[in-house]
Amino acid sequence: MNFALILFCLLLASGAIWLADVVFFRKLRAPGSKDPWWVEYGASFFPVILVVFVLRSFVVEPFKIPSGSMIPTLQVGDFILVNKFTYGIRLPVINKKIIDINQPQRGDVMVFRYPEDPSLDYIKRIVGVPGDKVEYQNKRLTINGKPVEQVRVDDYLHPERLYYSQQYVERVNGFDHRILTDKDAPAFIMDVARFPGRENCLYNNAGVICTVPKGQYFVMGDNRDNSRDSRYWGFVPDENIVGKAFFIWLNFGDLKRIGPFK
């Protein structure tokens, strides 16, 4: 469901009713008479829809985390906020950038339209920007020939499934975040799609090596062995970017999770 398009249509409809009443119909009604129901509802909803549309399109947009691909950073059921302007101002609905502000950086948690089905929104962490050589070999990440700093910490217990994953603190672009790997999961990548730019990647028994094309990004989930990401379906084009995720505003199961994250 394209909620932005639905909201835009509601904005146009309510705005048209409000404008038609101000310009034409209001002059035909007797002074002091009650507004028709369609004018009353249309005119009252228009400013509310306008505020929501502007905020959602240009400032922040809420999302709910549907899967565990970003555990431990984000949990299933987290409600998050996404900054819509940090990477530039985009026209709503068509998502075309009109003002460039900042470029996505390695380590950012980014929401984007899934390249194989743009009607779906995905969330992953950026590990490679245009021109980077990204190597994920034997579950170790290397960027431009330099291994990413990684420190082993206590294993992570998945409370719902009652099993442990190996947990590491990884440092990308000067910021720390936690990642998970499962020691029994294979290093090689299975079921790779025939994505645009596939010729930029080399797959082997140890994983994948990719050079990120211009205007594209390589993203991965923090739950490395339980995430379908750029390793499987390819790069994220700039035009698919929605914004940068930065804040958990609600989790019904754990209110302590509310706050900013990296």
Image (cartoon, helix red, strand yellow):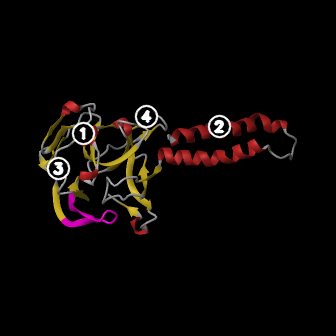
Which label sits on residue 191?
1
How many dots with numbers?
A: 4
- Work out whether 215 lies above or below 66: above
The Cα–Cα distance between marks 2 and 1, rounded to whole angstroms, is 45 Å
Distance, label 4 to label 3, CA atoms, is 39 Å
**Pointer 4 or 3: first along the chain:** 4
Looking at marks 2 and 1 on the same chain, the residue that comes earlier in the sequence is marked by 2
Q: Is 96 situated left or right of 50 in this image?
A: left
Between 40 and 97, the one nearer to me in the picture: 40
On residue 13, which mark appears? 2
Q: Categorize mark 2 by other alpha carbons within 10 Å: few (<14), some (14-19), many (20+).
A: few
| Helix, strand or loop under label 3 | loop
Quickly name the residue at label 3: 186
Say whether residue 8 is left or right of residue 131: right
| Residue 252 image offset from top left, x and y in percent | 46, 64
Q: Secondary structure at mark 2?
A: helix
Secondary structure of the residue carrying tag 1 is loop
Amino acid at dot 2: Ala
Q: Earlier in the sequence, mark 2 or mark 4?
A: 2
Q: Give residue 96's mark.
A: 4
Placement of the C terminus among the 4 image quadrants: bottom left
* Prevailing SS of the magenta stretch: strand
| Residue 40 drawn in magenta | no
- Spot occupied by residue 126 in the image (x, y as percentages of width and height): 28, 47
Query: Residue flagged by tag 3: what amino acid is it?
Result: Pro
Q: CA distance from mark 2 to mark 4?
A: 23 Å
